Amino acid sequence: MINIFEANETNEMIEQENLDVRTITLGISLMDCIDADLDRLCNKIYDKITITARNLVATGREIEAEYGIPIVNKRISVTPIALVGGAACKRPEDFVRIAETLDKAANAVGVNFLGGYSALVSKGMTRADELLIRSIPMALARTSLVCSSVNVGSTRTGINMDAVKLMGEIVKSTAEATKDNDCLGCAKLVIFCNAPDDNPFMAGAFHGVTEADAVINVGVSGPGVVKHALTKVRGENFEVLCETIKKTAFKVTRVGQLVAQEASRRLGIPFGIVDLSLAPTPAIGDSVADILEEMGLESVGAPGTTAALALLNDQVKKGGVMASSYVGGLSGAFIPVSEDQGMINAVNRGALTLEKLEAMTCVCSVGLDMIAIPGETRASTISGIIADEMAIGMINQKTTAVRLIPAVGKKVGDVLEFGGLLGSAPIMPVNTFSCEAFVNRTGRIPAPIHSFKN
């Protein structure tokens, strides 16, 4: 039972410390929509989504009102579209038709985003995979709510360098296709290694083929809550620091568990997982960078930053897994530059570089996330950055991702303004030495020796 002290404590977290449930994400399988006729396929997809998700937004609002817990986003993820559209799509424009159908369905049910315009190509690309990937710039330019992801590597299969090279070109093309909207398309495109099947966060969410027909996944967030808790233990030893983070992560995750179970019960859809990631926003006091600085760093990026982030990530997981039997997704600490005011401040003061961010991704939940780079950056350089990040994920048996935004017409020192949860992104310098000859090698980087566990 929850006592009055715990209820008051949770209320304080919500009202003063930016605690929220970041998203209820409804995963929907589209495997039963597959059809060789594109028109019939699009009609089936639209009907499946609008029927399955018709009560999602209303239910989220009911839970918000009843429990007083902010639920910032209601989202949908679907089966990777390269699998669904393979029989019907003969050219990239056919896949764009599906993207437009997804966008129409997402608008009809009132969700914030829909993820799953995706391909899984860690070992090789089918014709449908390549067609979908080549359609991404056009699809993201023509839709407003659709998000895209491509998994190009895994610990079990290695890194598909043909796909890595292609994705460098696609990122550039997506930036160009959406340049009149501050290259927003790139903010909705993620390249993964070891992508999870049950991630509720955008832009990388998709409904994995191992999942049920429909499932409810919830993502919680509480950087402000953790930061506030740490202000009470300033100067204490690492044991006290770790215990404080664990206890706080437990409380935050319990809120997510409550919302997930209620949404599942009311919608009549199975509960999947709670993702206990600390997902920041541009709001003051809702920053992962602020947590790291509260630990004792003058600025994120200072020596000790990677160790502090490793500690934070590990204790968040340890606290969260005790609060829910089903923890999944990404679960840890996100470090997106544009969405975290503390990270933005660190970049602006010169304390945080792309190379330091890459080091930090060895120990955090995701990877190089929401980073604006000069528009003139070569596609091969973007591919090289992707390859580096995929290697970190492959070797360390963890999920890593890249969401880079080449800012067309802008240079280092300029700023991209997205607004809302996406915030603003200072354009960071990129190493300009060429990796083109490396990226142009065809084939696959093999899986590491420790992947062979059978």
Image (spheres, helix red, strand yellow):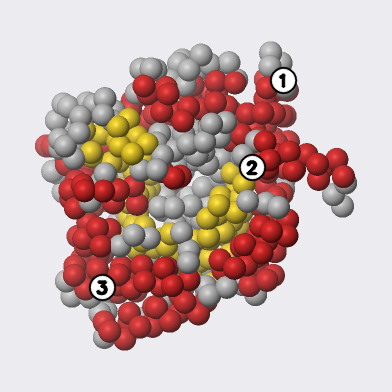
Residue appearing at x 62%, y 67% in the figure: 59
- State the count of labels: 3
Q: Is residue 38 left or right of residue 230?
A: left
Front-most of 388 and 313? 313
> Whole-Å distance between the Cαs marked 3 and 1?
55 Å
Contact, mark 3 vs mark 1 (Cβ under 8 Å): no
Q: Is residue 251 left or right of residue 298?
A: right
Q: Is residue 272 left or right of residue 344?
A: right
Relative image position of residue 53 (x, y in whole percent): 52, 73
What residue does disc 3 label?
A: 97
Residue appearing at x 25%, y 62% in the figure: 142
Say which mark, if any, is on residue 427. Answer: none
Whether residue 81 can be seen here: yes
> Whole-Å distance between the Cαs marked 2 and 3?
38 Å
- What's the residue type where badge 3 is placed? Arg
Nearer the camera: disc 2 or disc 3: 2
User: Residue 302's image quarter?
Assistant: top left
What residue does disc 1 label?
A: 233
- What's the residue type where badge 2 is placed? Leu
- What's the residue type where badge 1 is placed? Val
Nearer-N-terminus badge (2/1): 2
Residue appearing at x 59%, y 44% in the figure: 221
Say which mark, if any, is on residue 19. Answer: 2
